Image: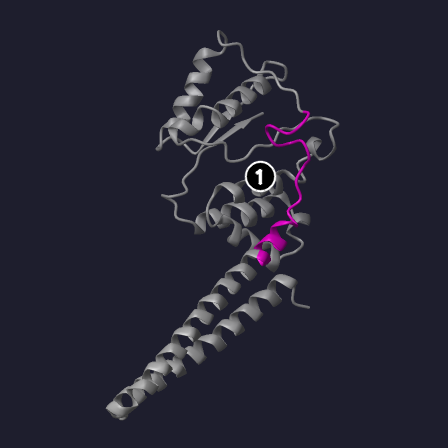
């Protein structure tokens, strides 16, 4: 059976088509009358033009209705995005420690320089032994992105903070859906593309991580303007 989002789309498209046809007919009739009637009938033409203006006004309302239905359909689809509670940077109740200002200076500067350069490599991978401070560095960078970063047209697009024994944060099953739920709020136009994916494949969240990444993130981002929405990725392990 068609999903609620699909039914809304079909209704909106049909409604707009009917209104467009009505507007075209009225406009054609008004044009025909103007060519064939004499001066004594100009008043009737004026009345017809007033009717046309009212019809066009109603068409604008129908267009606004369609936009509202589209937004509703997108919201219904995106509400199905599962996310790992507490995994997003800044989540309520999550304690974090940042680097002392006198420590890790060179490494932090290196990461910040990478983020500032538009032609840097797409991924900065921070990888070292467990317990050597990777999480602290990641918290520091995330805080920098959300505070000072926006002054330089830099923003924290999405984050996922793994934590052993903390529900879905201890596993990767909701990793890409959690990132997607954040990205649709930051990148213009991504919400529509992701909603289409969820509508066409309601079971996408049960698929492999590779397929989730491809359909929820990679393919939608490819469809957007690469120049306007170019982004880099910081990852820690």
Residue 55's place in the image compared with 204, above or below, is below
User: Is 84 within the magenta?
Assistant: yes
Quarter residue 60 falls in: bottom left
Magenta span main SS: loop
- Residue ID at (60%, 46%): 212
Quarter residue 20 falls in: bottom left
Residue named by callout 1: 179
Colouring: one colour
- Residue ID at (36%, 86%): 29
- Residue ID at (67%, 37%): 84
Identify the secondary structure beneath mark 1: helix
Residue 100 placed where, x, y %? 53, 9
The mark total stands at: 1
Residue 145 placed where, x, y %? 48, 26
In magenta, the rendered stretch is 72-93
Image position of 214 (left or right of 115): right
Q: Nearer the viewer, residue 186 or 209?
A: 186
Q: Nearer the viewer, residue 69 or 38?
A: 38
Q: Nearer the viewer, residue 54 or 219?
A: 54
Residue 4's place in the image compared with 103, above or below, is below
User: Which quadrant, please, contains the C terminus?
Assistant: top right
Q: Nearer the viewer, residue 82 or 212?
A: 82
Residue 101 placed where, x, y %? 49, 10
User: Is 43 within the magenta?
Assistant: no
Q: How many neighbours does mark 1 have within 10 angstroms: few (below 14), some (14-19), or many (20 or more)?
A: many
User: Which quadrant, please, contains the N terminus?
Assistant: bottom right
Quarter residue 47 falls in: bottom left
Residue 146 placed where, x, y %? 50, 27
- Residue ID at (67%, 44%): 82
Image position of 187 (left or right of 73): left
Residue lying farthest top?
102
Image position of 39 (left or right of 92): left
């Amino acid at each position: 059976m068609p999903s609620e989002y699909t039914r809304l789309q079909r209704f909106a498209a049909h409604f707009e088509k009917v209104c467009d046809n009505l507007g075209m007919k009225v406009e054609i009739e008004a044009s025909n009358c103007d060519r064939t009637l004499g001066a004594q009938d100009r008043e009737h033409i004026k009345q017809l033009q007033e009717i046309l203006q009212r019809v066009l006004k109603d068409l604008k309302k129908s267009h606004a209705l369609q936009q509202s239905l589209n937004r509703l359909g997108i919201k219904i689809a995106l509400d199905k995005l599962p996310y790992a509670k507490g995994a997003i940077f800044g989540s309520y109740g999550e304690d974090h420690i940042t680097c002392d200002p006198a420590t890790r200076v060179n490494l932090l500067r290196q990461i910040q320089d990478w983020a500032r350069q538009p032609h840097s490599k797409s991924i900065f991978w921070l990888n070292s032994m467990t317990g050597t401070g990777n999480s602290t560095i990641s918290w520091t960078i995330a805080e920098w992105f959300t505070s000072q970063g926006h002054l330089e047209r830099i923003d924290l697009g999405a984050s996922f903070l793994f934590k052993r024994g903390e529900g879905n944060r201890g596993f990767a099953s909701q990793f890409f859906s959690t990132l997607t739920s954040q990205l649709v709020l930051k990148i213009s136009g991504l919400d529509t593309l992701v909603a289409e994916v969820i509508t066409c494949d309601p079971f996408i969240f049960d698929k492999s991580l590779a397929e989730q990444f491809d359909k929820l993130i990679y393919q939608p981002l490819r469809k957007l303007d690469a120049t306007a929405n170019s982004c880099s990725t910081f990852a820690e392990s």
